[in-house]
Image: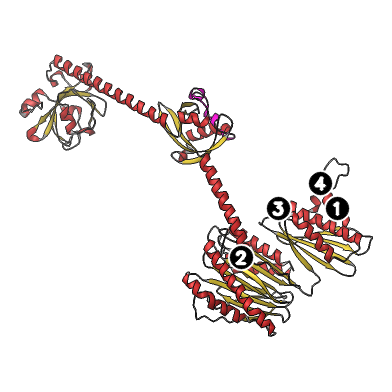
Amino acid sequence: MTRNVQLSVTALDALFPFHFVIDQALRLQSWGPSLPRLLPELAQGQSLVEYVSIQRPKLDSLDAAQILARQHMLFVLRRRSDGLQLRGQFMPLEEQQALLFAGTPWLSDTADLKKHHLALNDFAVHDATADLLQVLQQEKTSLQETASMAERLREQRLMLQSILNTAADAIITINQHGIIETFNPAAEQMFGWQAQEVIGRNVSLLMPEPHASQHDGYIAAFLCGSGRNLLGQRREVLALRRNGESFPAELSLSSIEHSGSTHFTGILRDISRRKAQEAALEAARTRELHIGHEIQQSLLFGKPLAVPGMEIAAFTQPSQGIDGDFFDFFPIEPGCFDIVTGDVMGKGIAAAMIGAAFKHQYNRLMAELLAPALACGTTPPVCGIVNELHERITPELQRLESFVTLTFARIDLRSNRLQYVNAGHPESLLIDASGTVRQLQGEHLPIGIARNETYTPCELSFCPGDLLLIYSDGVTEARNQQGELLGKEPVIALMSALHKLGLPAAIILQRLRLLVDQHEASHRRSDDFTALAMLRCEGSRWHSQEYPRKMLALAPLRDWLLQMASLPVERLDGLILASVEVATNIIRHVSAHLVDASFVVRLSQNDSSVTVEFYYVGDTFDPGTAPEPDFSGNSEGGFGLFIIRESVDRVSYLTPAEQVNLIRLETSRESAPAKHHTP
């Protein structure tokens, strides 16, 4: 029942000198004459909560409705400045839409009167029995609220325990010393331990080394303030089952402060099956990419021709396993051949299929044109081949909304001529024997852009000692971590320097690959990478051969030396033995910075001697660091170099350029060698 108070101001001041009136927003409107003694800073319109807090009863929220609902109860207010208490009751003043607090200071000792500048006549007369009944009612209400709260806590505990028992994830709690406090059934199943076996033990028994030994340090570092960014984040960790099996798990960590101590909760999910599935998918994808790569090698990339007087090398590396770059070599007549290389817009399988279709059209066209032309004593003209290709394939490219950049070149060693058409492809480089560099520019549009485009070839001389480099935009447009392009200038500078040194074409390409790797700081390509190098070396005394860095290359190397080297049997056997040992050392012991790197062997001979040179890209070898052979059998090492040194007359270890190494073997035709070793 709501009690409406109707008293005059004089009566209120006399009966309750410490009273005050607040509005519905708990703002002070008026007060009794004695209240300023307790609260001298009172100001009309200020909020009550700035001066006092409500100690009793406990309110769900501090508002007028909550106070009015408890008007029958004894209220205890506490002064914020020093804790002095006032007790009394709130009553509604309906006409004013306000609340009246009628009460007095609550002092336990009369000595406190002087302390607070009060006198006995400042206090209204109260019925002690009524006050006692109010306090008892308050305590009864508090006990009922406490019992209700205890019941709610019990229900919440039961609900929490049910969640822990039925959770699919392992839930483990530990204290700040790493001691396990709770271990739910899912954790028992995951780790193979029973809860009673691990509770009270260090959580490190659930993790493999080195984390087990370091875990206490992790907690100490966390308590000092580091590693808090890991809270609430899912991360992958290695966990350890009871049987010693480690397994991948996903961990989410949280912490809570309680009674001055830190406690941690870890939620773990066994992701072994997911990891196995991911590994299987990755293996399947790798197999598919490998198969696709093999198909691509056969469909899109031709093998460099063996042309007397030429060193021809080619390399390609897709950015996505399969790409749209393609190239091929087509022999026209002895000493005359065509090179076609292109780049389909886009990447992946779609680009590769368009590239394969382009090559198919080219091969079909050459089959149609070559025989009739040769029968007439001529060769199919370059302009006729490119324009016919353009006419046949452009409609399909436009239908597919694609295009192809192309460089088509014909090298004729008989006339020392190079004809080329550049259709939107990066500029090729021609470096002549004197070191002069020409960029083979072209103003033609890519194939597939405009049907009315007519392609006209350019013609240059191509003489002994000249180097032709054709490459895709994946070379000059390689980007570093700052997004900067490699550009043409570093490529031109490197090619000029290597050509001046007379290095093999395959080695020149490998150094170009290293240049791109170093710029991108990775062996993975941001774009498809294709490069071809044609070095004209006829008239030189060299014969050269390129071999993969695999042990299966040893037999072909031996057969080639038997065929090419003209030496007495004893001297030839020694040269072959030394050469096979050098090749074995390159294959087994030289760290290959490039995938699928090869080495090049050059052979020259005159009336008095035969020289074999091995070129490879990789770390420099210092023979002075190798041990001498121990013929007592107490130690190994040094026998390979000993065999090489004893099998030929002279061995030289040279470094003609950065990351380019040369091992030269020299042997005379005479049967009595005079051995020399050049470190």
**Badge 1 local density, few (<14 within 10 Å), some, or many (20+)?**
some
Q: How far is the residue under mark 4 from the one under mark 2? A: 45 Å
Left/right placement of residue 225 relative to residue 665 reads left
Q: Relative to 415, does residue 121 appear above or below in the rendering?
A: above
Q: How many marks?
A: 4
In terms of sequence position, does the residue under pointer 4 or pointer 2 come before the other? 2
Query: Horizontal and vertical percent for residue 655?
Result: 75, 60
Left/right placement of residue 669 relative to residue 213 reads right
Q: Picture quarter containing residue 76?
A: top left
Q: Residue 643: give its label.
A: 1
Left/right placement of residue 189 relative to residue 514 reads left
Foreground mark, 2 or 3? 2
**Callouts 2 and 1 close, C-beta under 8 Å:** no
* Residue span colored magenta: 193-211
Q: Which residue is mark 2?
A: 299
Quadrant assignment for the C terminus? bottom right
Please state which amino acid type lies under the numbered disc 1. Ile
Q: Which residue is mark 3?
A: 591
Please state which amino acid type lies under the numbered disc 4. Gly
Element at badge 1? helix
Rendered residue at 67%/58% (across/down): 596
Q: How far is the residue under mark 4 from the one under mark 1? A: 12 Å
Q: How far is the residue under mark 3 from the one under mark 1? A: 22 Å
Quadrant assignment for the N terminus? top left
In terms of sequence position, does the residue under pointer 4 or pointer 1 come before the other? 4
Q: Which residue is mark 4?
A: 637
Foreground mark, 2 or 1? 2
Residue 210 drawn in magenta: yes
Residue lying at the far right in this picture: please name it: 672
**Callouts 3 and 4 close, C-beta under 8 Å:** no
Query: Horizontal and vertical percent for residue 545?
Result: 76, 65
